[in-house]
Image: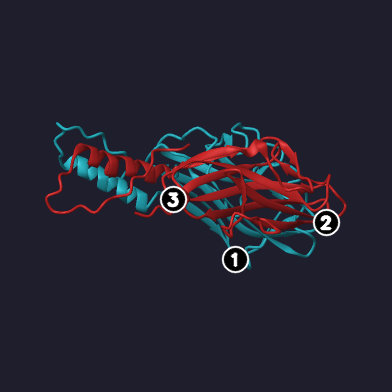
Chain colours: A red, B cyan
Amino acid sequence: MAGVIYNNIPEFKPLDIITADILNDYFRNNIDFLRDENYTYIVLTEDILATTSLVALSESEFTIETSGGGIEIEVNVNVNNSSASSRIITFDFLLDGTLYVSSGTGTPLDNGVYYSGVLANFPIMACFKVYIPPLDPGVHTLRLAMKANAASALTLTGSTTLATITAREVGINP
Amino acid sequence: MTFSVPETIYKTTILNSAFFNKILSSLWWLRKRPEDYASGGGTNVAKNTSLAWEAYDNPTFELALNMSNSSRPTVKFFANISSADMYVAFDVLIDGLYFMSSNTSTPDADGLFKVEPISSRTLGVYFEITPLWLSVFPAGVHTFELYIKTEGSVTFNGATNPIVFSVREGL
């Protein structure tokens, strides 16, 4: 789960006084942060049917507190196609209430962040990572969004396979 | 060397070598976390488990990771497989007990992942997961086994592509 916040390290100069607070902030807290890497996650344990509209799944909402870095989001889900016809699945994210794609524009591309065909009556595993450039420090809300090209066939199978969404803060610059 | 968060410093704390050794040890751990891996290659491996969960055993993908700290491990698997419209599901057994997908000794219906290569075509499989939903594992040796369940004959194409199962001390 979310750990302590990483503190950007200043440049120390001769005659600077190194206080206990400085040692705690820059040694203890930063080392603690680097080990845990500020991970947060959510596990989906239900089957969720994709619709023809891009829907941000309320079941997948979770938050991450950042200190000025970007966010790496990792998705591990399975999608099953129960139709006799091939289908297409699209994923995107809702970041702080706005649909987001890897272009960083905040405007979703036609095919979102991840786009895959699913053969008739076949399952696929969708394992992918997305990098979001640095955001303002604070608590950010994420949801996975999903869309199918046809209704009533594509299901995110959280009840029988792994369905996790993980996020961690990355790329913190001084 | 092990990882440990340095203790809180107070105005009256005397900084000694133990303090700095702890920091250096933790930095070493952050640079090089303990890991173990198994690699199968050179030959194709045909598997047919008839819808039952079985350990992948050619070669044996049973890893032993000596974790220097209590943590959750990161598990990776990479392979290229083919089948004639037969599905294969993957799961991981930890310490002979925990399937990652369910945190019980009984795997969920289709484990962590389930895929189905179509006839005469190959399919790349890759996953990297850290079971954050499980309790932290204590420091010490832990075993990790790759388990599979197949609908019929599935070939792991080790002759042409690497098959790698690895685990690394994590969060």
Q: Residue at x 43, y 54 (%)?
A: A171
Q: Position of residue B138 (x, y in %)?
A: 42, 34
**Residue at the disc numbered 3:** A69
Which image quadrant: the C terminus of chain A?
A: bottom left
Q: Position of residue B149 (x, y in %)?
A: 70, 45
Q: Residue at x 13, y 53 (%)?
A: A14
Mark 1 vs mark 3: in front: 3
Q: Position of residue B52 (x, y in %)?
A: 72, 41
How far is the residue under mark 1 from the one under mark 3? Answer: 43 Å
Chain bearing mark 2? A
**Residue lying farthest left?**
A15
How far is the residue under mark 2 from the one under mark 3? Answer: 39 Å
Tag 2: amino acid: Ser
Tag 1: amino acid: Gly
Mark 1 vs mark 2: in front: 2
Left or right, B156 with reference to A142: right
**Residue at the disc numbered 2:** A86
Tag 3: amino acid: Gly
Chain bearing mark 1? B
Could you tell me which secondary element the residue under label 1 belongs to?
A: loop
